[in-house]
Image: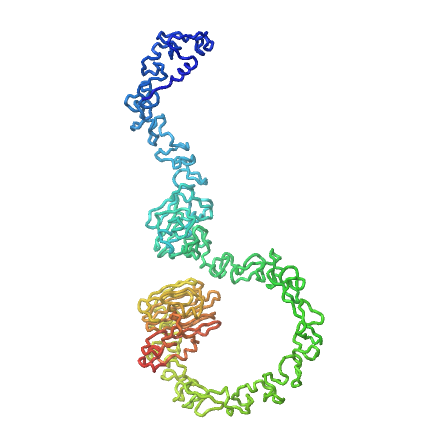
Amino acid sequence: MFRSHLSLFPLVLTCALLGCGDKGSSDSGTPGDGGADGGSVGDGGADLDVDADGDGWTPAAGDCDDADAAVFPGADEFCNGVDDDCDGYIDENSDDTDGDGIADCMDSEECDGLDNDGDGVVDNGMPDTDGDGILDCFDSEECDGLDNDGDGVVDNGFDEDGDGSSLCDPVPDCDDGNADRSPDFSEIDGDGIDNDCDELIDEGHWSPGDLLIVELMVDPAAVDDGAGEWFEVYNASASTVYLNGLVIESSGDAGHQVVSDEPIPIPRGEVALLAINDNASANGGVEGVDYDYNDISLLNGDDDLSISADGVLLDRVTWGSGSGLAAPTGASLMVDVLFFSASENDLPESWCAASWGWGAGTDLGTPGTPDQYCDIIDHDGDGYWVSDGDCDDGDPAIHPGATDTWYDGVDGNCDGWSDYDADLDGFDSSDYGGDDCRDDDPLVNPDATEICDARGADEDCDGLSNSDDPSAEGTVTFYADDDGDGYGSLLDSVESCDPVDGYVDVSGDCNDSDPSVYPGAPETWYDGVDADCAGDSDFDADGDGFDTDAYAGGDDCDDSDPFVNPDAREVCDDSGVDEDCNGLVNSEDPDVGESITYYRDDDGDGYGVDSDTRLGCDPIDGYADRGGDCDDTDPDRNPGETEVWYDGDDSDCDGWDDYDADKDGFAAEDYGGIDCDDTDPSVWPYAWEDDTDGVDNDCDGYVDVDDPDEPIAIRLSDDDYESVTFDRFTFPFCGSEYSSAYVTSNGLLTFGSTTTSYSESASTFRSMGYPAVGMWWDDLNPSHGGDIYVLEHDGAFAVYVQGIGEFSEGGTFVWTTVIMDDGHLFTAYEEMTGASDGLIGWTCGTGGSDYRELDLTAALGSINEGAFGIGDGTEDAVYEVFVSSMDVEDRTILYCGTAGSDDDGDGYTDLCGDSDDTDPTVHP
């Protein structure tokens, strides 16, 4: 219960000023005298001792309202809003239900959630305008067509921007904070705002080709497709366009409409990046995504992607079978920057796989930036691509083969060198803002060292030369020439840049008091004077270090011949000279050297066997001075004979199969072989079938276009490779059976793994870590021209190289490499124009020590009897490295490889010439 104190203060104040005495006490003051005559202060002179209301109490006695007879000290207090008993409290002891200091009897009901008047009903009689059971005072205005808060206004506050369109309309305002946007408005072209709330900005002017899809990451390798797919669109229109409202579609996916609270502009000639994921830490490092979507996926196989706006198809890209485009793994598909047009970006040849990376990503592409030249297109027709080093593929006059014109500001030959540094010393000419004072001399520039020289050049470009420059180096040593013969003495010298009187710059005078003695002076032998200052004995005219025996103390028996002296070695010759001065000549001298090797010749044909030789100065009976006889029992068989083919004898002892007259590595069919034409070295099994020559080149019984063989083209770029699988055979090589291989663009055929290296290093070749065949290992570039095909035959696999060239030198290379199911292999080289450096052969890649670096063309003449080709079958590698020239053109290099087994451990396999692999003492 609340007790009111509202009347307490006036009563206390009155008592304090006048004094509160017993009832009936009087004051002698006069009216208006401030209390001196008993009247109250400011009462206009009223008599405080007068009981005006007749209730028996005067104001002086404490009547707080002398106009109301019911109000006096001690009266009964009623709930009436009056201090009936003049105790300073109003309606004390009356109920105040809401606790606001006003008794219930005097309080009025308010809409405040309280029972203000104490009638037991909260908010009794308060209005609920919308009838929702919530009083107006507690209700909030809603977008429902009713006056929820009872303020007399329906849906008040739902058109904040005052554009006449509210959030409560059947088609609500899409942006109630922007008076320029309403579903009731018409689109205003060019203001960059979606005026009509249809999610499209500045629509109505779209035409096909205004936006082009110019780059696609379909199959990322660094992350999953669902995290790393993205594509790029290019604004090909004449003004800024907006992504807002565009529809993206991909085969099999529902269309996705671009929705954004903010405009997404693409200025004219710029690109926008759209991605399935805008988190660079999870999407493969792609940053700067302009818009991310989540319900479109790009298939790696057959698929398409389109963008449309306001019902207009702007662009579509299709890839997969029949389209001419294939999505690469780990690289984007991109349109060449010169083909950014609606018609050209529809052509497959305008696209290529990206060859640049970005940021921290490992995949290749140019997300968010205008794309680059495709490096497989020669845009300006000058014969060079970007990948060839063309630094301006839009200008046919600029390419690596052009002649640079100095000082025109253009790097005409794309060597990256400053166009104002003609002498290539790293400093621009001072005539063009640089500081090189002589741009025609690479030895003159600010970093050069000033040297003393006769030309007086200012090598360091500081304006001083020779002795005038305190930093000059390389002063000349001058020597005193007292006898004036032009040669000075080493005993007296000075350093200077310029000549000094009495001194010369040539030393070596061993007697500077005699002008006839100096370096190079005519020597008079045996006079005891070293006239030419050579420092040698005057009694050794032939300069062999021994004085002539014509003077005491000498022992040179012929001082006119430097090859005759006591230290010389006696040699076999016809002159009968005693070279070592011991009194004995030729065979008489037991120390004779440089004798002739003679070979045992039992059949008397003038050629002996290499296994039985003797040394001598003169012919030896039963021996010949030439070796190489392969049958010393038959005078008709030796290296000087003419070969008679197909008689079973190697008449000329060259080691070649007597049934392979054309030396293509295959014996004639008529003698048990498989060569269908043993007169033509270009005809053999597995050879490239020429469809125009009327010849069955590969001996399969079919001629030209009738041949059912269909070689498969391998499309390789520079430093590239392709994996191929064998269906009909396996290749036994280096201890394993292989059913697949890698064909590389740099002339390697590898097994198990591969490389794009072109180092041509023998040590690298031997230690690759996996087996390889060096067909012609070099820096080749199939993308610059020519073709590579593969074809699997019964029991063999062939690689056909047709007209590719070296990366920087060009050329035309044609060869065929064949590997066979018995482990043998060979390469038939045809045209090798322009080939100089390269490596051919095979390796197991183990880095083992049992390798052979041979002259393979020479080794063809010493193939083990009964073996297919060069080698013993147990080597780690067999190869030849060519540095500046080669001799393989029009030759077939046959290798035994690692074919067969070496059961007896003698180092030769049964398929590489070991006729009895059970006996280690029997081998080639």
Q: Is residue 335 left or right of residue 528?
A: left
Q: Nearer the viewer, residue 459 or 117?
A: 117
Q: Is residue 755 visible?
A: yes
The residue depicted at 44 percent of the width and 38 percent of the height is: 188
Where the C terminus falls, by quadrant?
A: bottom left
Q: Position of residue 11 (x, y in %)?
A: 39, 15
**Way the structure is coloured:** rainbow
Return the residue found at the far left: 120
- Number of numbered callouts drawn: 0
Q: Is residue 67 left or right of residue 559?
A: left
Q: Quadrant of residue 670?
A: bottom left
Q: Position of residue 98 (x, y in %)?
A: 32, 23
Residue 105 vertical placement versus 916 (above, below): above
Where the N terminus falls, by quadrant?
A: top left
Q: Position of residue 498 (x, y in %)?
A: 68, 67
Q: Nearer the viewer, residue 262 or 455?
A: 455
Residue 824 vertical placement versus 598 (above, below): above
The residue depicted at 35 percent of the width and 23 percent of the height is: 100
Q: Nearer the viewer, residue 154 or 266?
A: 154
Residue 689 vertical placement versus 74 (above, below): below
Q: Position of residue 458 (x, y in %)?
A: 64, 62
Residue 10 vertical placement versus 302 (above, below): above
Q: Quadrant of residue 265?
A: top left
Q: Nearer the viewer, residue 23 or 922?
A: 23
Q: Is residue 702 visible?
A: no
